[in-house]
Image (tube, grey):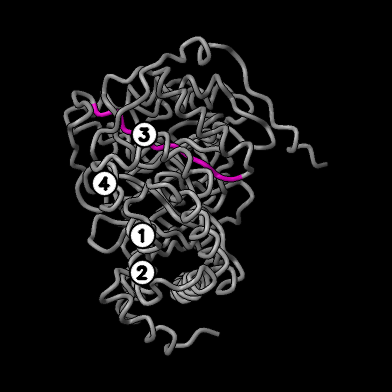
Amino acid sequence: MINIWEVKETNTMIEQENLDVRTITLGISLLDCIDSDLEQLNKNIYNKITTVAKDLVAVGEKIENEFAIPIVNKRISVTPIALVGGAACKTLEDFATIADTLDAAAKAVGVNLIGGYSALVSKGMTKADELLIRSIPTALCRTERVCSSVNLASTKTGINMDAVRLMGEILLEVAEQSKDRDSVDCMKLVVFCNAPDDNPFMAGAFHGVTEADAVINVGVSGPGVVKTALEKVRGESFEVLCETIKKTAFKVTRVGQLVAQEASRMLNIPFGIIDLSLAPTPAIGDSVADILCEIGLEYAGAPGTTAALAMLNDQVKKGGVMASSYVGGLSGAFIPVSEDQGMIDSVQAGAITLEKLEAMTCVCSVGLDMIAIPGDTKATTISGIIADEMALGMVNQKTTAARLIPVIGKDVGDTVEFGGLFGYAPIMPVNKFSCDDFINRKGRIPAPIHSFKN
């Protein structure tokens, strides 16, 4: 049982150390909405979302007021739309109308974002999958709250290189269509290897087909809390360091568990998972990079960074699984550039390059997240970066992702302002050598030998 005294223990964390519940995400299955008539399909989707999620925002606000716990976002994830729309959608525009419907439903119930404009193509693409992927630029350009993701690879199936090549082209199209806004729509698109079915964090959230009809998933975050705790054990041994991180993660997860239980009870919807992710914001003191510096690095990116991040990620997860029986999603540490002031400082100091970030993604929760790159980067180069990230996830049997932002009209030395939780980012240099012949091969990279476990 969780009681109010546990919540009161976290008051200082909330008031002074940027602890927050980053999101309550309501996952909704749209499988029962499927219809071969596009108009009826859109009507079914709108009605299902606005019925199931009608009280989500009100319940979130009530929990905030009752327990004095800030809940930054209320979000919805839905069944991957490539599956839902396959029977009715014959053109790119057909799929884009579903994005319009998702956006309208999200606005009607008042949520911040809705995820699930997605396709799962790790082994191959159906016609519906390819149509949805090619419709992504149009869908993101004309909607406000819709987020999109594509799973390109998995440890079990390998890497779909045809889809990787296509996504390099699609990402540049998204960037071009929003170039008057610094290619901002790219923030709403992410590609995955081993995408989880229960991720509450955008842009990668979708409601997996293994999930119940509706489920509550909560994402909780607290980089500032961990950093403050580590300030009290400066110079201590690794054993003390690890115990401090673990105990702090336990307390943070308990806050998320309370919110999840209350939301589940009030909405009468089953509780799914707690995602304990150290997700930074631009706020001073709310930085994963600052935690790495507190551990003993001059800048994130210095020698030892990957080891420090591996330790941090592992202890966060160990603390989380003791606090909740259902820890899932992407739990661990995020290392985005634009959303983390410490990471921005490290890039500007020359301590972090794209290659060092790639190495760090071997041990963190996600991957290359919110990385702004020159707008003239070739599609094949973007696909090459994506392929490298997919390979890390495939071989290491973990979730990896890439959320790259080619900012049209900007180059290395420039910065781009995204605003709000997204902050700003320096444009990072990209390796100029060509991978064209590699990316233009057809087919897929097979699964690694250790994937055969049947």
Q: Is residue 268 visible?
A: no
Q: Which mark's residue is nearer the viewer, 3 or 1?
A: 3
Task: Judge the density around disc 1: few (<14), some (14-19), many (≥20) Cα neighbours within 10 Å.
Answer: many
Query: Which is more N-terminal, label 2 or label 1?
Result: 2
Query: What residue is pinned by disc 4?
Result: 344
Q: Is residue 26 visible?
A: yes
User: Considering the image in quadrants, where does the C terminus appear?
Assistant: top right
Query: What residue is pinned by disc 2?
Result: 60
Which residue type carries mark 2?
Gly
Q: Which mark's residue is nearer the viewer, 3 or 4?
A: 4
Q: Which mark's residue is nearer the viewer, 1 or 4?
A: 4
Query: What residue is pinned by disc 1?
Result: 74
Q: Which stretch did the figure color magenta?
A: 398-407
Residue occupying image coordinates x 51% and y 11%: 440
Assign the magenta stretch its main secondary structure.
strand
Occupied quadrant, residue 410:
top left
- Please tell me whether residue 451 belongs to the stretch shown in magenta: no
Circle 2: element type: helix
Work out whether 320 lies above or below 381: below
Residue 270: image x %, image y %? 56, 66
Residue 203: image x %, image y %? 40, 44
- 1 and 4 marks in contact (CB < 8 Å): no
Task: Judge the density around disc 4: few (<14), some (14-19), many (≥20) Cα neighbours within 10 Å.
Answer: many
- 1 and 2 marks in contact (CB < 8 Å): yes
Label 1 – label 4 distance at C-alpha: 27 Å
Residue 9: image x %, image y %? 39, 85
Label 3 – label 1 distance at C-alpha: 24 Å
Query: Which is more N-terminal, label 4 or label 3?
Result: 4
Circle 4: element type: helix
Q: Which mark's residue is nearer the viewer, 2 or 4?
A: 4
